[in-house]
Amino acid sequence: MRCLLITAVVLAAASPASASTFSGSCHLAGTVAFDPPLTNSPKPITQLARLTGTCDGRFVDAHHRAHELSGAPVTDTGWSEAPAGSCTAGTADGFGTLTFPYGRIRFRLSETRVAAFPLLTFDGRRSGSARAAATPSMSQDPVAALQACAGAGLTAFAIDARLQTMPQISG
């Protein structure tokens, strides 16, 4: 009996955990920080993003429990590298996490940006994807951003984004 119990515990510990899945849409707002500061001249850039917002849809947690979401809080944190990023354009690849009240979803991130309008693809670590379009936040001063880009560089930029799963993301 003791051998059977130990075997069951070892097998349970070795089995992979289920991934959480989300299907729906989110409205997000926050800041992207650039290191070194973003200028009009292309150069390697590291980007750190932290956005918060709300989501509507269906979230299935790692224990297979379904949760219907309406205005549920979410946090999006991401890190990416742009090999030739500038204020005028760039592409970046990285990773991130969407954190919901019932669990989190890890993803790979791809960004294509023309000026201040990035298009983002979130590929779930397990499966599925989501797309997001970002725009400058109403709180972002466009004149100050342009001046920073032409000078010492833009260290951070406030954005708003709308995320939509295609049809779901799991990670």
Image (cartoon, grey):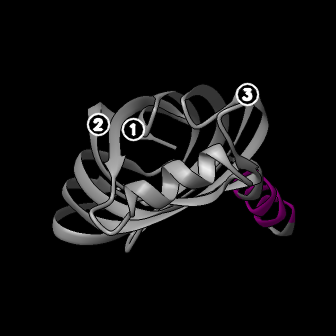
Vertical relation: 116 (above or below) 77: above
* Secondary structure of the residue carrying numbered label 3: loop
In the image, 138 versus 95, the foreground residue is 138
Q: Distance between the residues labelled 2 and 1?
A: 6 Å
The amino acid on which the numbered mark 2 sits, given as a three-letter code, is: Thr
Image quarter (top left, top right, bottom left or bottom right) of the N terminus: bottom right
Residue placed at 33% from the left, 69% from the top? 139
How would you rate the neighbour count of disc 3 (Cα within 10 Å): few for under 14, some for 14-19, many for 20 or more?
some
Residue placed at 81% from the left, 57% from the top? 10
Q: Mark 1 points at which residue?
A: 169
Per the rendered image, the range of residues in magenta is 3-12
Q: Distance between the residues labelled 1 and 3?
A: 32 Å
Figure quadrant of residue 117: top left
Residue 104 visible in the current orientation:
no
Left or right, residue 71 beside residue 100: left
The amino acid on which the numbered mark 3 sits, given as a three-letter code, is: Pro
* Secondary structure of the residue carrying numbered label 1: strand
* Secondary structure of the residue carrying numbered label 2: strand
The image shows residue 2 at horizontal and vertical percentages of: 84, 69
Mark 2 touching mark 1, by CB under 8 A?
A: yes
Figure quadrant of residue 150: top right
Residue placed at 69% from the left, 50% from the top? 151
Q: Which mark is residue 138?
A: none
Q: How far apart are marks 3 and 2 (CA)?
A: 31 Å
Q: Earlier in the sequence, mark 3 or mark 2?
A: 3
The image shows residue 68 at horizontal and vertical percentages of: 16, 62
